[in-house]
């Protein structure tokens, strides 16, 4: 069946600052990247054939092998321009999607450091995009006390955390908005909307946190 531009797409950049063993670190038996890709898939979400992992040329073969081993051979893997910055990876992913699916309308951007992200977050981000928002990010309230310090490290104030949020993945973009952000890098002029994030998802420092994240995943499995 031919792809439709109305279907959402997704890009997972694995740029030159990411050591290959980080994105491909085994977590509960599968690469962290595989867990991230799977959180994008499912009915009403992103078809596997509309997900693209964009990475540096030297990592393409290893990424493709990891995805194929997990039964995700339909996910595309493309090489970015050199030197392989995050922006270049996003541009390569967006170019591939535009060529393959006739200019996608909505694009999710995910990150290999968030293997615990639930599909419910993906659903909320997609729903907000469908409602017309050009940029959507999942967020959580900050619960820790935040202090402001001076140049010497002395505390000068307690920041009102009522207005503060932590930002998670995946993040959603109208395709033309993402293209413009790749060029200028500033999303504040694009009406950024927020949806509820996942309190059980945390950013992982991989491969150092692989055992911890794997234990959390194993603890979630039905017994």
Image (tube, rainbow, N blue to C red):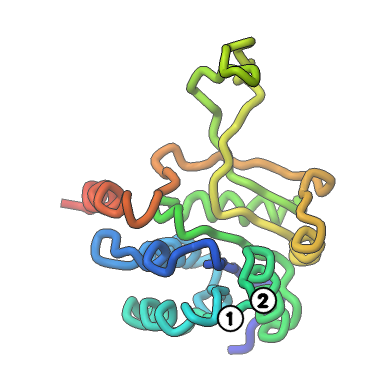
> Where is 90 relative to 82, above or below?
above
Residue 134: x %, y % from top left? 77, 54
Q: Which callout, 1 or 2, points at the residue further toward the start of the chain?
A: 1
Count residues near mark 2 (Cα–Cα under 10 Å), then give few for <14, some for 14-19, many for 20+: many
- Label 1, label 2: how far apart the Cα atoms are: 7 Å
Q: Which residue lies furthest to the left in this view?
A: 223
The residue shown at (57%, 18%) is 153
Left or right? Give the position of 129 relative to 11.
right
Per the rendering, the mark at residue 92 is: 2
The residue shown at (44%, 46%) is 203
Residue 77: x %, y % from top left? 52, 80
**Mark 2 element type:** helix
Residue 26: x %, y % from top left? 29, 64
The residue shown at (50%, 76%) is 48
* Camera-nearest residue between 59 and 92: 59
Q: Mark 1 points at which residue?
A: 79
């Amino acid at each position: 069946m031919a792809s439709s531009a109305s279907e959402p797409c997704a890009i997972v950049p694995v740029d030159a600052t990411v050591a290959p063993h980080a994105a491909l670190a085994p977590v509960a038996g599968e690469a962290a990247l595989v867990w991230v890709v799977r959180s994008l898939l499912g009915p009403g979400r992103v078809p596997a054939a509309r997900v693209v992992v964009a990475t540096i040329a030297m990592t393409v073969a290893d990424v493709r092998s990891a995805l194929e081993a997990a039964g995700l051979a339909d996910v595309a893997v493309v090489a970015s321009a050199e030197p392989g910055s995050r922006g270049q990876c996003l541009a390569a992913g967006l170019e591939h999607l535009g060529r393959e699916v006739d200019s996608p309308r909505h694009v999710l951007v995910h990150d290999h450091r968030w293997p615990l992200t639930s599909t419910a977050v993906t659903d909320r981000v997609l729903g907000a995009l469908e409602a017309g928002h050009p940029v959507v990010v999942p967020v959580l309230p900050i619960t820790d006390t935040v202090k402001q310090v001076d140049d010497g490290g002395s505390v000068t104030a307690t920041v009102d955390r009522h207005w503060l949020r932590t930002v998670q993945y995946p993040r959603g973009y109208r395709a033309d908005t993402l293209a413009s952000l790749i060029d200028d890098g500033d999303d504040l002029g694009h009406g950024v909307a927020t949806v509820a994030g996942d309190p059980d998802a945390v950013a992982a420092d991989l491969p150092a946190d692989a055992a911890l994240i794997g234990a959390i995943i194993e603890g979630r499995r039905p017994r």
